[in-house]
């Protein structure tokens, strides 16, 4: 059974947490004690009925204010598929949290309040999901019950969003009218909207095709750990040398010829193991251990790939950055530590090309710095090369994390556009 990771996004009070609560409730993925706690909290707050949003808003500040601040992860399964949900905040000042939640998603659900139509935050989050190369996008027009389940309202919002989407790179776009509060078109088809002939949200989530989204062409295996069981008394393990890591792209099989970077040596895969058990093949995102035919000097941060299909060994990186620090701005000459897959190197920002207004998509080329939650294009110079692909080709090898070395804090994320 495969796993679908999806993130919810949208403006404040569009009903993201209520939608997830409804999904969990109607698919019977809630424990009785969880439901009892939510019912008790709802009663204490004087609310009529059960506030399903409380199932995901776990922080006390979130419950007090009725908003989502941090990314809340929830897990559930149906007979067809397992799901990991990232409920991301709607507030502008929590853009960095939304980026974190959507960065690993296969699909994003952008909610729009049927009464308000598209807002700046709707456009912002749609832009961010395309910047993060989320392959599938669902525009869920929520609160249809408050506009009398009017088909004209739904059609108008779809047309407005479609016009905006022509300026974005969206691979797969689906529109679904829903009412999270009443459960219309969430798990079951709604009798209140006979004019809508598409699937319910859960049916779409269960059937959307994600197997072809992953890059199964470019073999990329960043080495995370070298396994040498020196202390073992088993003589068969005396010369054991395994290279553990998570497959970031392609398919690996025993007997395949592979290339090691940075040395450039070629060898072949003797066997592949996961949890000590041999497997016939490995593909993203499996975590495995490779055993090779030859002794090659390989350490953490190195890359294993195909001889005729290798990533760029790059020290100059161009990319789109989302700046996440409230304590300092990103400016040219800013010194940072870069973490790319399993490799960590020092870097300096050599250029800030422009800042993007995520509401209008306008490029401000006069910008001299990026503040908290702002997005722009920068150029980095690294002290050592990283083995990178463009983010559009491989999200695992095309992404960087920027770290403030003094504070040991993550201050930004980069989606690589060019690596040389």
Image (cartoon, helix red, strand yellow):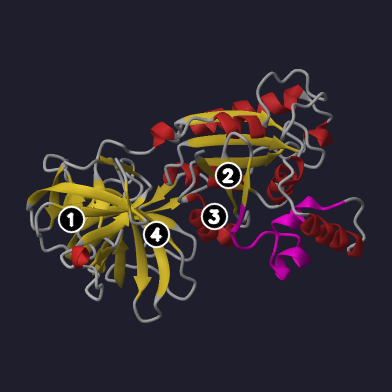
Question: Which circle's residue, 2 or 3, is located before the other in the chain?
Answer: 2
| Residue located at (42% from left, 42% from top) | 133
Select label 2 or label 3 by which is in front: 2
What residue would you read off at disc 4?
413
Q: What element carries label 2?
A: strand
Left or right: 142 as drawn, with respect to 274: right
Residue range of the region highlighted in magenta in the rendering: 50-74
Is residue 382 visible in this depiction of the protein? Answer: no
Q: Mark 1 points at which residue?
A: 314
Q: Earlier in the sequence, mark 1 or mark 2?
A: 2
Label 3 with label 4: CB-CB less than 8 Å: no
Q: Name the residue under label 2.
A: 83
> Which type of secondary structure does the marked residue at label 3 adopt?
helix
CA gap between label 3 and label 4 equals 12 Å
Name the residue carrying label 3: 98
* Image depth: mark 2 or mark 4 in front: 2
Q: Nearer the viewer, residue 38 or 368?
A: 38
Q: How many labels does the image show?
A: 4
Dot 4: few (<14), some (14–19), or many (≥20) neighbours within 10 Å? Answer: many
Q: Which residue is drawn at 78% across and 37% down?
A: 183
Residue 336, horizontal then vertical, whole percent: 30, 71
Callout 4 secondary element: strand
């Amino acid at each position: 059974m495969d796993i679908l990771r999806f993130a919810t996004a949208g403006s404040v009070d569009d009903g993201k947490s209520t939608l997830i609560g409804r999904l969990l409730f109607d698919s019977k993925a809630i424990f009785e004690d969880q439901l009892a706690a939510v019912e008790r909290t709802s009663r204490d707050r004087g609310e009529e009925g059960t506030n399903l949003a409380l199932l995901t808003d776990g922080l006390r500040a979130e419950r007090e204010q009725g908003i989502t601040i941090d990314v809340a992860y929830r897990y559930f399964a149906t007979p067809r598929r397992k799901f990991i949900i990232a409920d991301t905040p709607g507030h502008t000042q929590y853009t960095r949290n939304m980026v974190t939640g959507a960065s690993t998603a296969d699909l994003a659900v952008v909610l729009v309040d049927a009464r308000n139509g598209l807002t700046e935050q709707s456009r912002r989050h749609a832009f961010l999901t395309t910047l993060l190369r989320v392959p599938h996008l669902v525009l869920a027009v929520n609160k249809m019950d408050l506009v009398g389940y009017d088909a004209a309202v739904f059609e108008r919002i779809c047309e407005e969003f479609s016009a905006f989407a022509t300026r974005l790179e969206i691979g797969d776009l689906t529109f679904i009218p829903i009412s999270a509060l009443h459960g219309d078109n969430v798990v079951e088809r709604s009798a209140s909207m006979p004019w809508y002939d598409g699937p319910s949200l859960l049916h779409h989530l269960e059937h959307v095709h994600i197997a072809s989204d992953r890059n199964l062409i470019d073999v990329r295996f960043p080495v995370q750990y070298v396994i040498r069981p020196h202390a073992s008394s088993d003589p068969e393990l005396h010369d054991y040398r395994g290279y553990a890591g998570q497959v970031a792209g392609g398919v690996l099989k025993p007997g395949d010829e592979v290339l090691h970077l940075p040395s450039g040596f070629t060898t072949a895969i003797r066997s592949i193991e996961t949890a000590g058990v041999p497997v016939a093949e490995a593909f993203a995102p499996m975590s495995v251990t490779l055993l090779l035919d030859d002794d090659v000097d390989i350490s953490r941060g190195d890359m294993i790939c195909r001889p005729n299909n290798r990533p760029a060994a790059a020290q100059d990186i161009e990319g789109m950055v989302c700046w996440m620090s409230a304590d300092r701005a990103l400016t040219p000459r800013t010194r940072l530590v870069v973490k790319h897959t399993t490799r960590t190197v020092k870097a300096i920002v050599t250029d800030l090309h422009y800042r993007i207004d995520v509401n209008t998509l306008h490029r401000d080329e006069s910008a001299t710095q990026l503040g908290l939650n702002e997005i722009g294009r920068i150029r980095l110079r690294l002290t050592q090369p990283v083995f990178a692909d463009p983010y559009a080709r491989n999200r695992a090898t095309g992404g960087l994390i920027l770290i403030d070395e003094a504070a040991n804090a993550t201050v930004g994320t980069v989606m690589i556009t060019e690596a040389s």
